[in-house]
Image (cartoon, helix red, strand yellow):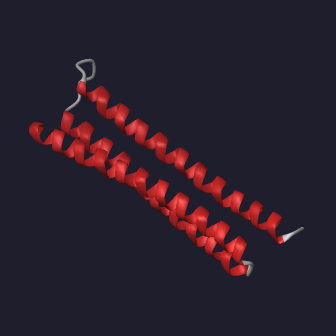
């Protein structure tokens, strides 16, 4: 098996792992927002501050998953960089690290922004 094929296979495995964790993050974020939104309507009896704390907690947990999955992705792909001396292979892996690093970081910023917005909104109910 050629180095390129081997790198592609390993990189795809790590990209898939990161993608699966991102699915968990999006699911948790969606659950938190849905839960928080439902608590704002009159059909559910719950203190808005309690709903905010639960939503923020779910977002915080998903943020931890988000950052930890990125850390694992970068760590594992660094092993690939060390394993294969070819500059073209290293550049391809680094490019994946940058792209996934940026997109995962943007998602983390969105999560933090949503949390800040919930905190600002909930202050009036405390």
- Could you tell me residue 98's position as x and y percent? 53, 64
Q: Residue at x 23, y 29 (%)?
A: 46
> Is any atom of residue 65 visible in this view?
no
Q: Please identify the quarter of the rendering in which residue 80 is found.
A: bottom right
Q: Residue furthest top?
A: 43
> Is any atom of residue 124 visible in this view?
yes
Q: Is residue 121 left or right of residue 28?
A: left
Q: Is residue 120 left or right of residue 105?
A: left
- The quadrant in which the C terminus is found is top left
Q: Is residue 84 left or right of residue 32?
A: right
Q: Residue at x 37, y 39 (%)?
A: 32
- Could you tell me residue 33's position as x and y percent? 35, 36
- Could you tell me residue 89's position as x and y percent? 72, 71
Q: Residue furthest front?
A: 88
| Above/below status of 118 relative to 101 | above
Q: Residue furthest right?
A: 1
Q: Nearer the viewer, residue 102 or 77?
A: 102
Q: Residue at x 67, y 76 (%)?
A: 81
Q: Please identify the quarter of the rendering in which residue 122 is found.
A: top left
- The quadrant in which the N terminus is found is bottom right
Q: Is residue 110 left or right of residue 40?
A: right
| Above/below status of 28 relative to 63 | above
| Above/below status of 64 relative to 81 | above
Total labels: the figure holds 0
Q: Nearer the viewer, residue 16 or 89?
A: 89
């Amino acid at each position: 098996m050629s180095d390129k094929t081997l790198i592609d296979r390993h990189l795809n495995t790590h990209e898939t792992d990161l993608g699966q964790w991102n699915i968990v993050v999006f699911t948790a974020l969606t659950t938190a927002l849905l839960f928080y939104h439902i608590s704002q309507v009159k059909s559910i009896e719950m203190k808005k501050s309690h709903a905010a704390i639960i939503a923020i907690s779910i977002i915080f947990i998903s943020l931890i998953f988000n950052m930890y999955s990125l850390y694992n992705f970068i760590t594992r792909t660094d092993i690939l960089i060390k394993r294969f001396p070819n500059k073209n292979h290293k550049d391809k892996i680094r490019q994946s690290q940058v792209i996934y690093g940026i997109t995962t970081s943007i998602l983390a910023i969105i999560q933090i922004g949503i949390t800040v917005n919930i905190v600002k909104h909930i202050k009036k109910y405390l």
